């Protein structure tokens, strides 16, 4: 197995390791994820995967595709378990922004525009988590974000073609995870003293 493919397989394994406890918690009805948020994240992640394939991301794109499929599964599972299904106007704005990436890609014939839009949408999706984690830093699982930071770093190393289209999304998400981890650690230390 080639080096890039091995990194991709490790990144896929980290994806499963990160998601398993979350999915188990949904099945046990310990958590109730917001269905529409997961629909948006699943859609954005899977479209980024397609854009990375279009730009010859190769094995490095595989973990993003697997993550997109698992994220869509989480949305379906959340719906089946009757989790939070409220949809606000802001939810629709993010969903429409994510879906607007497809016409940009189609009309420009450049997947970069789709990746830029989807990366921005995903970062906006972090805002509620940052806000909640700031006020309740002990309510978040640091390991989940650490695994995704590591996974996205491996994705970048596994890419077979480096361009803004293939690197932007995993790099920005890894950075967002790092910033969230640092903020949570700081807030936990501050509140523990």
Image (cartoon, rainbow, N blue to C red):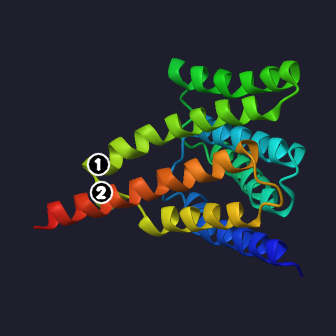
Q: Is residue 67 above or below residue 93?
A: below
Q: Residue at x 45, y 58 (%)?
A: 178
Q: Secondary structure at mark 2?
A: helix
Gap in Å between the C-alphas at discs 1 and 2?
6 Å
Mark 1 and mark 2 residues within 8 Å of each other at the beta carbon: yes
Residue 137, numbered circle: 2
Give the residue pinned by disc 1: 134
Image height check: is 135 above or below 66? above
- Occupied quadrant, residue 35: top right
Q: Secondary structure at mark 1?
A: helix
Residue at the (55%, 62%) spot, across then down: 149
- Write the residue at 78% across / 21% down: 104
Q: Nearer the viewer, residue 53 or 41?
A: 53
Q: Position of residue 63 (x, y in %)?
A: 75, 61
- Tell me the crowding category of disc 2: few under 14, some 14 to 19, or many 20 or more residues within 10 angstroms, Cα based: many
Dot 1, crowdedness within 10 Å: few (<14), some or many (≥20)?
some
């Amino acid at each position: 197995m080639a080096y890039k493919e091995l990194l991709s397989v490790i990144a896929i394994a980290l994806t499963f390791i990160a998601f398993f406890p979350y999915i188990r918690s949904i099945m046990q009805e310990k958590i109730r994820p917001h269905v529409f948020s997961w629909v948006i994240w699943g859609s954005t992640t899977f479209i980024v995967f397609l854009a990375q394939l279009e730009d010859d991301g190769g094995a490095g794109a595989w973990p993003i595709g697997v993550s997109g499929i698992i994220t869509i599964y989480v949305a379906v599972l959340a719906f089946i378990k009757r989790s939070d299904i409220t949809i606000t106007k802001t939810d629709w704005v993010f969903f429409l922004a994510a879906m607007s990436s497809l016409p940009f890609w189609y009309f420009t014939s450049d997947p970069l525009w789709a990746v830029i839009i989807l990366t921005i949408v995903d970062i906006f999706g972090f805002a509620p988590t940052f806000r909640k984690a700031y006020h309740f830093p002990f309510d978040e699982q640091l390991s989940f974000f650490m695994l995704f930071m590591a996974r996205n770093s491996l994705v970048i190393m596994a890419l077979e073609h480096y361009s803004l289209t293939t690197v932007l999304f995993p790099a920005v998400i890894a950075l967002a995870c790092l910033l969230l981890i640092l903020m949570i650690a700081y807030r936990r230390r501050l509140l523990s003293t």
